[in-house]
Amino acid sequence: MATYLDGIVLAHRVAAAGDSRDEGELREAIAAAEPARGFASAIRAAEGLAVIAEVKRRSPSKGDLFADLDPVQLAGQYERGGATCLSVLTDEVHFGGSPDDLAAARGATRLPVLRKDFTVSTNDVLDARLMGADCVLLIAAALDDDELVSFHRTAVEVGLDALVEVHDEAELERALAVGATLVGVNQRDLVTFEVDHERAVRMAAAFPDHLVSVAESGVRGPEDAAALAEAGYDAVLVGESLVTSGDPTAAVAALRSATR
């Protein structure tokens, strides 16, 4: 059955097919870049439940959330609220994001940053590093086994953490098979696009102790955050409820204090 993800991924694959840049030259440019900030290590070091606060202008299902946000201002508000890491959408067509948003947000804080996008090629991984990201997103449902292995290996080679996103136990097994140590459960159903607020809690028991675990999508506030912390998650990735809160600093602080 076709999912909402299929059309987005297809558009990215078409763009990747037209990318004629030389991988070796991209790797040479990365060799001259500053070291990445440790994304997974920041989560491990956090006191209580870590919060990955997202810079998100719009979503395919709900349209504009905060279309004219200032990534510098928003990132600063997140950091003051106690955010552990940032996530920045760089997909322009479907989410209104850009690499400029990522560079601006990262430059305004000391926090590690996830490039939130649809990684479908080796050059996408390298681009994440070149634009200043500290972590790249690999969506298991969008990649075959060979791609997942290759892109995860490339991320490690260039100094990036890789957040492998899964939706069920079968995808978790695929993530573990490539050596993933940072795994996120997306609670949004790929077929209906609805959020299942119990998905992450149900899956928590399947996570090995050594994984850094992240719950994604559908975190509405401190009550949800507390339930996910109780289930054993190390972090929550939160976008919509923060950018629409009216007070991002207080909203992040509420998520952080809910589990202390």
Image: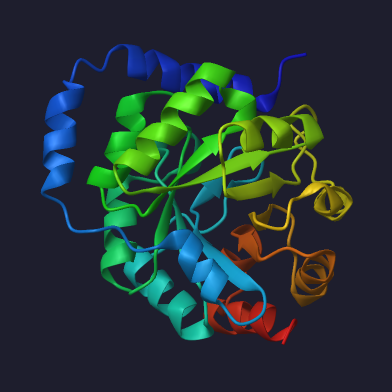
Locate residue 194: give its quadrant: top right
Query: In the figure, is residue 207 to the left or right of 98?
Result: right
Residue 144 appearing in the image: no
Residue 95 vertical placement versus 23 (above, below): below
Residue 126 spot, x, y in % from top left = 29, 36
Coordinates of residue 134 in the picture (x, y in percent): 36, 55
Q: Is residue 227 above or below residue 103?
A: below
Residue 71 x/y as whole percent: 36, 64
Q: Is residue 226 left or right of residue 106?
A: right
Q: What residue do we see at 12% from left, 36% from top? A: 28
Residue ID at (62%, 61%): 238
Q: Quadrant of the C terminus?
A: bottom right
Residue 145 is at least partly visible in this image = yes
Please name whichever residue, 138 or 93, is drawn nearer the observer in this view of the structure. Answer: 138
Task: Choose between 49 and 237: the one closer to the eye.
Answer: 49
Frontmost residue, 182 versus 246:
182
**Tally of numbered tags:** 0
The quadrant holding residue 189 is top right
Residue 166 x, y percent position in the rendering: 68, 38
Direction from residue 118 to residue 165 in the image, left or right: right
Looking at the image, residue 256 sits to the left or right of residue 157; the answer is right
Q: Please name the colour scheme applied to the rendered image.
A: rainbow
Quarter of the rendering occupied by the N terminus: top right
Q: Residue at position x 18%, y 21% from top?
A: 21
Q: Residue at x 77, y 70 (%)?
A: 229
| As drawn, 90 above or below 110 | above
